[in-house]
Image (cartoon, rainbow, N blue to C red):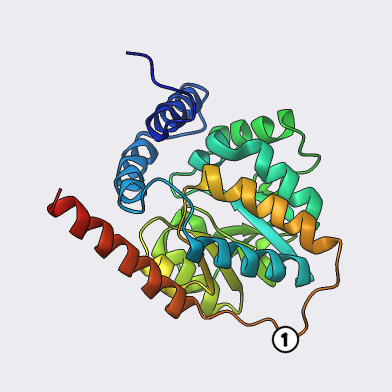
């Protein structure tokens, strides 16, 4: 049976193909494939669509990125494989630096990701030149190693598909953190300043377009966003969806 391209299942299959391709190119590790499976489950629970709460978070994220003095987009293997073009476009619109940062780090993999981003239009990619390395305090994983020209001096960091330990460490280091996380109950989601509960393949495209629109007009001076309240609404949506499924 052929699945229409607009069908959510077709989108899921396309995402899997991109990740497998990324694995074969040396961008994605096996653990990244496993992590994606968990994300697919939560995407199903939110209805495989961008929620109203996610649209609100995207607007807040666009405002924060455009207001930042030194924004940085942190990129891991899954993110590069899924959203390379959107990463480059977002960096162009917001003036953000692009920095490779990996939990399962190797020189070869960092270089592969940087080259892949450059093939998709990035002019400069940070994070793989050891002579510019610095460390985030209070973090033990390989992700503590950051670029002194990028995340080390950033005021705002977009950290899609993030682990909780680094989000907490970045916050303690004085950074504002924006994240994509389909699980609104995770440590990352609960710790970040702005959490976009959405699939990155949908949310990144929307974030780019929102930044483009907001850049054309003056930014609101007293823009307010309540991440906890927004996350609670996302959790309520998941509970309602589960309730409907249990009575189906």
Is residue 174 found left or right of 106 in the rendered image?
right
Q: Quadrant of residue 165?
A: bottom left
**Given the current orientation, which residue lies at the most extreme bottom position?**
222
* Residue 122 coordinates in the image, percent (x, y): 76, 39
Circle 1: is it few (<14), some (14-19), or many (20+) Cα within 10 Å? few
The correct choice, above or below, for 29 with respect to 238 in the image is above
Q: Quadrant of residue 72?
A: bottom right
Q: How many marks?
A: 1
**Given the current orientation, which residue lies at the most extreme top position?**
1
* Residue 222 coordinates in the image, percent (x, y): 72, 86
* Residue 221 coordinates in the image, percent (x, y): 78, 83
Badge 1 is on which residue? 222
Q: Is residue 185 visible?
A: no
209 and 157: which is toward the camera = 209
Where the N terminus falls, by quadrant? top left
* Residue 88 coordinates in the image, percent (x, y): 72, 43
Picture residue at 39% right of the left edge, 40% below the top: 32
The correct choice, above or below, for 234 with respect to 76 in the image is below
**Given the current orientation, which residue lies at the most extreme front position?**
248
128 and 36: which is toward the camera = 36
Picture residue at 35% right of the left edge, 34% below the top: 30
Q: Is residue 33 visible?
A: yes
The correct choice, above or below, for 159 with respect to 172 in the image is above
Is residue 234 found left or right of 132 in the rendered image?
left
Q: Secondary structure at mark 1?
A: loop
Picture residue at 52% right of the left edge, 54% below the top: 160
The correct choice, above or below, for 119 with respect to 98 in the image is above
């Amino acid at each position: 049976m052929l699945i229409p391209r607009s069908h959510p299942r077709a989108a899921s299959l396309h995402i899997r193909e991109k990740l497998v391709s990324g694995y074969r190119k040396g961008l994605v590790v096996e653990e990244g494939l496993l992590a994606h499976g968990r994300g697919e489950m939560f995407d199903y629970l939110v209805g495989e669509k961008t929620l109203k709460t996610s649209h609100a978070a995207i607007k807040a994220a666009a405002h924060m990125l455009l207001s930042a003095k030194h924004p940085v987009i942190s990129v891991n293997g899954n993110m590069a494989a899924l959203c390379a073009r959107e990463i480059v476009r977002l960096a162009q619109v917001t003036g953000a630096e692009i920095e490779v940062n990996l939990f399962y780090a190797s020189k070869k993999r960092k270089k592969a990701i940087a080259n892949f981003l450059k093939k998709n239009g990035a002019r400069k990619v940070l994070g793989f030149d050891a002579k510019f390395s610095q460390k985030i305090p209070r973090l033990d994983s390989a992700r503590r190693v950051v670029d002194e020209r990028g995340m080390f001096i950033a005021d705002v960091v977009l950290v899609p598909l993030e682990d909780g330990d680094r989000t907490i460490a970045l916050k303690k280091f004085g950074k504002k953190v924006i994240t994509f996380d389909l699980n609104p109950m995770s440590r990352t989601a609960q710790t970040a300043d702005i959490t976009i509960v959405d699939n990155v393949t949908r949310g990144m495209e929307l974030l780019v377009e929102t930044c483009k629109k907001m850049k054309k007009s003056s930014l609101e001076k007293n823009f307010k966003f309540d991440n906890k309240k927004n996350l609670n609404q996302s959790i309520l949506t998941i509970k309602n969806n589960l309730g409907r499924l249990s009575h189906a």
